[in-house]
Image: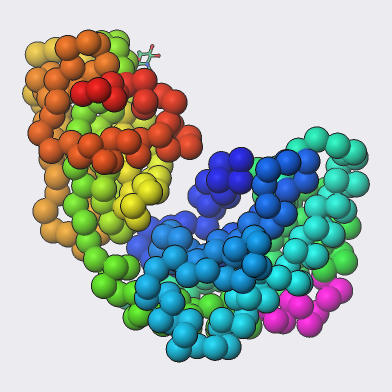
Amino acid sequence: MGKLILLILFCHVSSAAKHSLKYFFTVSSGVPNLPELEVIAQVDDIMVGYCDPDTKIVEAKQDWVKKYLDDSPQQLEWYNAQCSYNQPNLLKATIFRLKQEFDQSGGVHVLQKINGCEWDDETDEGIGFHQYGYDGEDILFLNLTTLTWIALKPQAVVIKLRWDADMPRINYNKDFLTRICPDWLKKSLDYGKSSLLRTERPSVSLLQKTPSSPVSCHATGFYPHRAVMFWRKDGEDLHEDVDQGEILPNHDETFQMSVDLNLSSINPEDWRRYDCVFQLSGVEDDIVTKLDKAVIRTNEGKSEISAGVDQQHVSDLKAPDNGAELSMRLNPET
Ligand SMILES: *[C@@H]1O[C@H](CO)[C@@H](O)[C@H](O)[C@H]1NC(C)=O
Ligand SMILES: *[C@@H]1O[C@H](CO)[C@@H](O)[C@H](O)[C@H]1NC(C)=O
């Protein structure tokens, strides 16, 4: 549940060619098996640490993060504070207030806070962000120019007014988002450069559920997440009949994405004019896959296997938002 909402909000803060450090805080009410507070930290959309819900201390996900925190006791202390006292209480008070404002006495509710910063290593420009979502919709964010909270729903106005009056907290947030966060992000990129600044090319395959379904060009196993994929006809980019999917994380710190081509108005003899192109930031060569019946993987019994489909990544296709559809397209036995 938390993961799904995370993806919805995530779109607003992610952009093309930048590095990012993001913190996701999730509190829920009415969900029996979720910990009261879930906190994760991501660098370039890779999870680098989280709060252990039992010990309430930060756990590093990678060796370089351990080294970084060992070298930076003040940061370790800051992270542990995020896991323990002030965050849970502030977030719990906020979800309690929102339930009142929305007139909700029971049911399942989720409040999520996302803050952090982006930094462009070419222009050295950065931006900070700090926003809240409730039940999957954005409700509040901090405008760092006016230093005021913006309520995106009438029910959030009470909270906005209260938080606007808390100038010390706003100033702390501003300092954190515009000075401390970019500094920590740059240090992270330095400590983690061998993994964070690597490139990995994906395997690309063509998938089709039934003969009348769109053909999905699917790339999995790439890193970093700065990638684009599109269909071309006679070498020209296509926008019609194309459904661009979003970039989703795999379990092994790589990413996957797919772009669907609706074949219904395309003559079979014209298929050879189409190809799918995958471009990865920092890598010169594109991966080009021609639209060819012989390499399409289907779920129709006698499925053909395209060269280079990585079995490990096939199991990663059960991603939260398109998993159901993709697992129908792929026969796990193949
Ligand atoms: C913050 O406020 C300024 C001044 O009103 C405005 O120009 C800017 O677009 C706002 N920023 C966001 C992210 O809405
Ligand atoms: C494909 O295009 C046809 C005709 O343009 C349309 O009727 C059909 O709904 C489309 N299919 C999908 C899956 O979008």
Name the residue at the front extreme: 55
Residue 8 seen in the current view: no
Q: In percent of the image, x 69 and y 57: which residue is there?
A: 37
Give the quarter the ligand 2 occupies: top left
* Quadrant assignment for the C terminus: top left
Q: In percent of the image, x 35 and y 63: which residue is there?
A: 17
Q: Is residue 165 found inside the magenta-colored segment of the image?
A: yes
The answer to whether 266 appears left or right of 177 in the picture is: left
Residue 18 seen in the current view: yes
Q: In percent of the image, x 40 and y 81: which residue is there?
A: 67
The answer to whether 246 appears left or right of 273 in the picture is: right
Is 296 in front, or is 56?
A: 56
Magenta highlight range:
164-174
The answer to whether 320 appears left or right of 56 in the picture is: left
> How many badges with numbers are in the image?
0
On the image, which quarter does residue 50 sit in? bottom right
Residue 249 location, x and y as percent?
39, 48
Vertically, is 143 above or below 311? below
Residue 88 location, x and y as percent?
75, 64
Residue 103 location, x and y as percent?
90, 40
Q: In percent of the image, x 77 and y 56: which residue is there?
A: 151
Q: Is residue 180 found inside the magenta-colored segment of the image?
A: no
Residue 182 location, x and y as percent?
49, 79
Q: Main secondary structure of the magenta part?
A: helix
* Quadrant assignment for the N terminus: top right
Vertically, is 126 above or below 333? below
Vertically, is 261 above or below 167? above
The answer to whether 281 appears left or right of 159 in the picture is: left
